[in-house]
Structures are given as C-alpha cells and as structure tokens.
Amino acid sequence: MKRIIPATIIAIIGITIAYFMIDQPKKLKVYNPIDINPELVDESVRKVDKYHRVGAFKLTNQDGQLITENNYRNKIYITDFFFVTCPTICPKMTDQMHRVYNEFKANDDIMFLSHTVMPEADSVPVLKEYANKLNVNANKWNFVTGDKKQIYNLARKTYFAAITEGDGGVNDFIHTENFVLVDKEKRLRGFYDGTSKKDVDRLIEDINALLYEYKDN
C-alpha cells in the first residue's frame, strides 16, 4: 500500500527549498573576451574563450608608490578609467565609485583601482590632491598614472572597458563610463555603467555575491 504524504508536509518542504534558493546570492558569470560585446574587445583577443586573466602591470599611485598586480593579490577589486579635469562623466563616476568605497571600506577583501587616461596631465601630485579631496585610503583605493600605452592596453585588451580603437599614441584618447569587477583569481566578473546609480546598485549586489562565493574558501 502506498504511503500518502500529507499536503502540509509537501508545502513545508517546498517553502523550505524556496527559502534557501532565494537566500543564496546569484553565481556571477566568469567573462572571457568571446563573451563580451565585440565593440569593447580589441580585435587581437576577441576569439579567446577561456583562461582570460588580468596580467602584469606597473603603475604609480597618488603616493608615488609602485603599484602592480601583486598589490591586488587575493583581493576583489573594481577598476575604472578617468581623468581629473573631466567635466562630464567622470564626476558622476567618481561619486558612484566613492559610494561603493564607503559601502566596503571596512572590508579588507575589497579594493579599488582608478587609471587616469591622461597621464601626461595627471601627475602624482595631481592625483594626490584628487584623492585627498575624496578622503580615501591609498591602501584601499589607488589612483594610478604611468605609461599611456600600458594604461590604454589595460583598458582595451585586459578589462575591455573602452569601445574606441587606438594605439595609445599622442592622439589616442579613451573616455569610458565602465566599471569592471575583478575577482581574487584576476577574472572578470561584471561590467557596469559608472554613471548610473541603478547599475552601481547592481555592482554592490554582485560584490556581495562574490564575497559569499569566497566565504568558505
């Protein structure tokens, strides 16, 4: 004779399963160049479908310190590209990034990396003054300058933050509103419009999802 499970027990089981499914943060996608809008990806790497990572770089921060990929070892970080005298999108981006900074400033797993796209103008003292106005900690948020070609290659071939093509030369210029989320393995996990509060709210949610992903590691 078959045993009949009472409807109330089935309902309780269903509610319990639904609760735990809802309570789990979403698992973020790992992006490789082939997954990203081709307009944002340099032609040389568009067909790469696995193992994309942020590689080596050497830049200088607002305190005149050398910043490399090692400063971000085992960290989740958010990166963008800006310039100090930008009158249009950059102030909005900085306000939104600062909002994310304040949200996670007590969390040692989260860092920030902002590259100037005008290194010829945004010297160390200029970046220092800019960072001081924001009252941010350089151990957590680096504003970096350095070789223009290196910075532009990072934007186009590593973080895929810029639509325009170029060689990083004198007449080349990048102006992008994109924020990029990078995980502890140096993999790309999300792209966001840094001028949009709604999209940056999504970034904050995704950072929390990544923190959850790493919590048992």
Image (cartoon, rainbow, N blue to C red):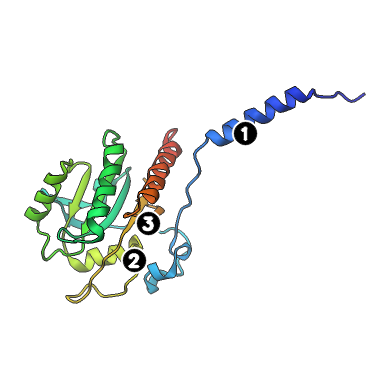
Q: Are marks 2 and 1 in contact (CB under 8 Å)?
A: no
Q: Quadrant of residue 39?
A: bottom left
Q: Residue furthest right?
A: 1
In the image, residue 94 sits, relative to residue 42, either above or below, namely: above
Q: Looking at this view, is 30 or 53 the one in front?
A: 30
Q: Indicate the amino acid at tag 2.
A: Lys
For mark 2, give the secondary structure: helix
* Residue 71 locus on image (x, y percent): 24, 46
For mark 3, give the secondary structure: loop
**In the drawing, does residue 188 fall left or right of residue 89?**
right
Identified at 23% across, 71% down, the residue is 173
Label 2 vs label 1: CA separation? 41 Å
* Residue 77 locus on image (x, y percent): 31, 47
Residue designated by label 2: 157
Residue designated by label 3: 53
Q: Quadrant of residue 81?
A: bottom left
Q: Label 2 crowding class (10 Å Cα cut-off): few <14, some 14-19, many 20+?
A: some
Q: Label 3 crowding class (10 Å Cα cut-off): few <14, some 14-19, many 20+?
A: some
Q: Label 1 crowding class (10 Å Cα cut-off): few <14, some 14-19, many 20+?
A: few
* Residue 26 locus on image (x, y percent): 50, 43
- Asked if residue 28 shows in the view, the reply is yes
Label 3 vs label 2: CA separation? 10 Å
Q: Nearer the viewer, mark 3 or mark 1?
A: 1
Identified at 32% across, 38% down, the residue is 109
**In which quadrant is the C terminus drawn?**
top left
For mark 1, give the secondary structure: helix
Q: Indicate the amino acid at tag 1.
A: Ala
Residue designated by label 1: 18
**In which quadrant is the N terminus drawn?**
top right
The mark nearer the N terminus, 3 or 2, is 3
